[in-house]
Amino acid sequence: QVQLVESGGGLVQPGGSLRLSCVSSRNIFSIYAMGWYRQAPGKQRELVASLLVGGTTNYADSVKGRFTISRDNAKNTVYLQMNSLKPDDTAVYYCNADVRTVAIRNNYWGQGTQVTVSS
């Protein structure tokens, strides 16, 4: 089992910045992939950014150049730095842990944190 707790969401004006944090109950250096997803009202949950155990990152086209995913292994924490925020970034943001072993694969989710971009 992996418990994930997100924080850092809130209300921000267009063009502003926020940093989301996700604290894992398990050492993240052993987790295959950590990711941030988001879900806006009436839309499907979508991948925003992911960070593989080897350091490879992947971003949705809509956030490339504006968002940065990073991790602090010592704190078991993954971050999402969001800059130049737009109203379209408004959503509930979820942290995800993709845990893989030789035999199994499990996905774990946090409870979500609301990000609202509005003037």
Image (cartoon, rainbow, N blue to C red):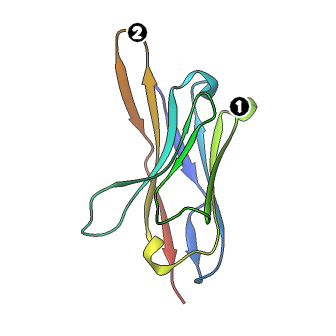
Looking at the picture, how far across and down is residue 116, in whole percent?
A: 49, 74
In the rendering, at what x and y percent does residue 112 appear? 44, 53
User: From what the image shows, is residue 70 above or below residue 60?
Assistant: above
Figure quadrant of residue 106? top left
User: Badge 2, how many Cα within 10 Å: few under 14, some, many 20+?
Assistant: few
Residue with the mark numbered 2: 102
In this view, which residue lies farthest toward the right? Answer: 74
Label 1 crowd bin: few (<14), some (14–19), many (20+), radius 10 Å: few
Determine the residue positioned at 54% across, 49% down.
Answer: 6
Relative to 105, does residue 98 appear above or below in the rendering? Answer: below
Mark 1 secondary-structure assignment: helix
The answer to the question of whether label 2 and label 1 lie on touching residues, with beta carbons closer than 8 A, is: no
Residue at point 54%, 90% (across, down): 119
What is the three-letter code of the residue carrying label 1? Asn
Q: Image check: 89 left or right of 51?
A: left
Q: Residue furthest left?
A: 42
Across and down, in percent, residue 57 comes to 57, 43
Q: Residue 70 lies in what quarter of the image?
A: top right
